[in-house]
Amino acid sequence: MKTITILVPAYNEEEALPLYYAEISRLTESLTSYAWDLLFVDDGSTDGTADALRRLREADTRVRYLRLSRNFGKENAMLAGFDYAEGDATIVMDCDLQDPVDVIPQMLQAWEEGYEDVYARRVTRGKEPLLRKWLTRAYYALLQRSSRFDVLPNVGDFRLLDKKCVAALRSLRETQRYTKGLFCWIGFRKKEVLFHRADRRTGHSSFSYASLMRLALDGLTSFTTAPLRLSMLCGVLVSLAAFVYLVYVVAKTLIFGEPVQGYPTLVTLILFLGGMQLLALGIIGEYVARIYNEAKQRPVYLVESLNGEPVNI
Ligand code: UDP
Ligand code: MG
């Protein structure tokens, strides 16, 4: 019998967990041809999530739960899950019931047909602020254009991965992770299934605009060096323009002489060039910071316990 791991990162989800468990066990009862491994990653929650998970495991031994030593963020929590996933296939999903469990049979069917990465694409996104929707769309357009492979818009982390894909993801240990991009980067045979994203049932999204912005920057810098090239291009254009202007100024001075004037021109040029230089430096700094972080080679996450028992690392 094939084993399917359901990997669920959970951060402060004590209210959502019982509801989610009810849904997922309804599904597993209807699909008895598979063995199920329900793996929860408690990403350093500060509410009753740990207790809720312990109760779930007491009632159902298919449940396993991993607790990280602090909140490492969803991207890192997912890697922890991949490291501990044992199934022939792993399904990543959120436990706020925004990812409907009813899509899973379709995913499994596609997997049985030989697809190795079956991702769910949302036709509707659920309740979200208009600004967030709009910014997300603009961001994907930018990322799509500047990186060399497809980063799919409207595709989240909800997907089924064959164990080959899980092994591939495990081997990518970068610390500032942008898993949505990594899924695309690893390749393998992909297929999409469509779904309608529901609204969050309880609690609230843990992603603020600031954390989304950080994630967006991680995505851009880890998958494209286009900003660096763009600043070089700006440099070339400005130098060319400066050269033309230089010829003009020299010629003008030779022909007409030069009464001291041109204060506005000077100020504008200095400010403009200063701004451009700082911008380019900032872009370089962003990449240098990432090199620095990777060079430290810290582990991506630390485990506190597995199923309530301490683990040796
Ligand atoms: N999550 C996590 N660590 C975090 C933040 C979120 O493991 O630091 C989990 C959270 O419990 C949920 C999933 O990631 O299962 C998606 O989070 P959320 O619903 O807040 O994000 P959104 O749906 O708004 O993108
Ligand atoms: Mg959510």
Image: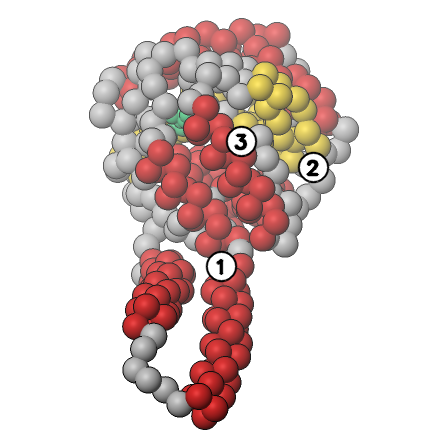
Q: Is tag 1's residue or tag 2's residue first in the polypeptide sequence?
A: 2
Q: Which residue is mark 1?
A: 227
Graded by Cα atoms within 10 Å as few (under 14), some (14 to 19) or many (20 or more), the crowding at tag 2 reads some
Q: Quadrant of the N terminus?
A: top right
Task: Point out residue 81 in the picture as x, y percentages from the top left corner.
Answer: 44, 35
Between the C-alphas of marks 1 and 3, the distance is 24 Å
Q: Is mark 1 within 8 Å of ligand 1?
A: no
Place of residue 85 in the rendered image (x, y in percent of width and height, measured from the top left): 49, 34
Residue linked to disc 3:
156
Quadrant location of residue 34?
top right
Label 3 within 8 A of ligand 1 by Cβ: yes
At horizontal 65% and vertical 17% (from top left) the residue drawn is 105
Instruction: Give the label on residue 190, or none.
Output: 2
Q: Is residue 284 visible?
A: no
Picture quadrant of residue 65: top left
- Coloured how? secondary structure
Q: Amino acid at mark 1?
A: Pro
Q: Would residue 304 be found to the left or right of residue 255 on screen?
A: left
Could you tell me which residue is drawn at 53 percent across and 79 percent down? Answer: 244
